Amino acid sequence: MVEVLFLGVGAALPMTGQTNSSFLLRTEDACILIDCGPAIMQQLAAVGVSPGEITHVFLTHRHGDHILGYPMLMLWWAISAPPGAQCPTIVAGEITFKTLDLLAAEVFGGHTSELAGHAARVALPDMQPMALQLTPLVKLYTQPMNHAEFAPDLGARFEVSGKVLAFTGDTSPNDNIATLARDADLLVHDSTYSATLNPDYAAGIFGHSTAQISGRSAFASNARHLALVHIDAIYEGKVQTLLQEAQHEFIGRVSIPVAGTLFTF
Ligand SMILES: [Zn+2]
């Protein structure tokens, strides 16, 4: 069993009623939270998942819409976790960890900070690819994306039970995406902008991609299914244009998930 559950799909400042992009990858031996924005506790509650079910937290980069829920998650572990429960393993780039540690120390301090300090951690290089066996069934590969010098982004490729799930996090187009998502069963791709509605953005802008770029990435990587996420609020009511834009580049399945969408593999 491999599942991807979308907790939120929005950009940094999401469309009305949306929350920030965050995903749960569930396997037979893990429940991996991918990004942890400010609404994470409400996002988990909305899909009936307890923070206590999470075994790993993977943070793509340190921008607030991807990590500001981290101290809230740690607060839950400090206050509400059942005795003896195992705090999740935190997996992130080295620069991202600097901010996570600062948040844990400065936002609540005390037991929450101590708990975060003692959580198992895997600190990854920000600027080079990495591979590690995350659990007996899950292998994780990371690739540097192209987002912001201040906040380097690591794309994640999870290989589990013969399935491949790839997540770019925030990125403009780059050669590593095709490697990250090679033959992926699902590619979840930054699609912040539309090349159709904003032709000036066609090459990618502000460290983000268009739906057209996402379609080209899916084609180049031979992915089966492309999910467009992190769509900017300026496209409220116009997301079908982004769907068509990606479909023009990629013959496989293209989706625009919403919070609560579940894909099983
Ligand atoms: Zn970002």
Image (spheres, helix red, strand yellow):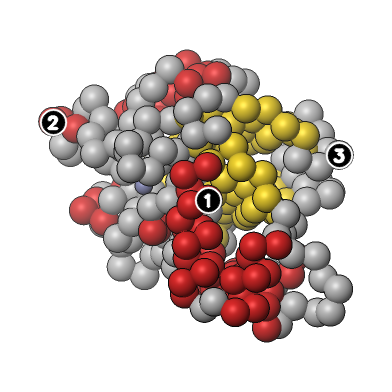
In this rendered view, identify the residue nearer to me: 65 or 212.
Answer: 65
- Which comes sooner in the sequence, label 2 or label 1? 1
Q: Give the residue type at disc 3.
A: Pro
The residue shown at (26%, 30%) is: 204
Mark nearer the viewer, 3 or 1: 1
- The answer to whether 23 appears left or right of 201 in the picture is right
Element under disc 2: helix
Q: Is residue 228 left or right of residue 195?
A: right
Amino acid type at circle 1 is Phe
Three-letter code, disc 2: Asp
Please, which residue is most extreme toward the left here? 200
Q: CA distance from mark 2 to mark 1?
A: 34 Å
Please rate how many residues cluster around mark 2, counting C-alpha atoms within 10 Å: few if below 14, some from 14 to 19, many from 20.
Answer: few
Residue 139, x across and y down, in percent? 74, 33
Spatial CA distance of label 3 from label 2 is 46 Å
Which quarter shows the N terminus?
top right
Residue 174 left/right relative to 137: left
Locate residue 182, reporting x and y percent. Answer: 59, 20
Name the N-terminal-most of marks 3 and 1.
Answer: 1
Sort mark 3 into few (<14), some (14-19) or many (20+) by Cα contacts within 10 Å: few
Q: CA distance from mark 3 to mark 1?
A: 24 Å
Disc 1 secondary structure class: helix
Q: Which labelled disc corresponds to residue 97?
A: 1
The residue pinned by badge 2 equals 200
Which is closer to the viewer, label 2 or label 1? Answer: 1
Q: Which quarter of the image is occupied by the C terminus? A: top right
Kindly tell me whether residue 185 is visible in this rendering.
Answer: no
Vertical order, 258 against 134 (above or below): below
Q: Position of residue 42 (x, y in %)?
A: 53, 74
SS class, disc 3? loop
Q: Give the residue pinned by disc 3.
A: 136
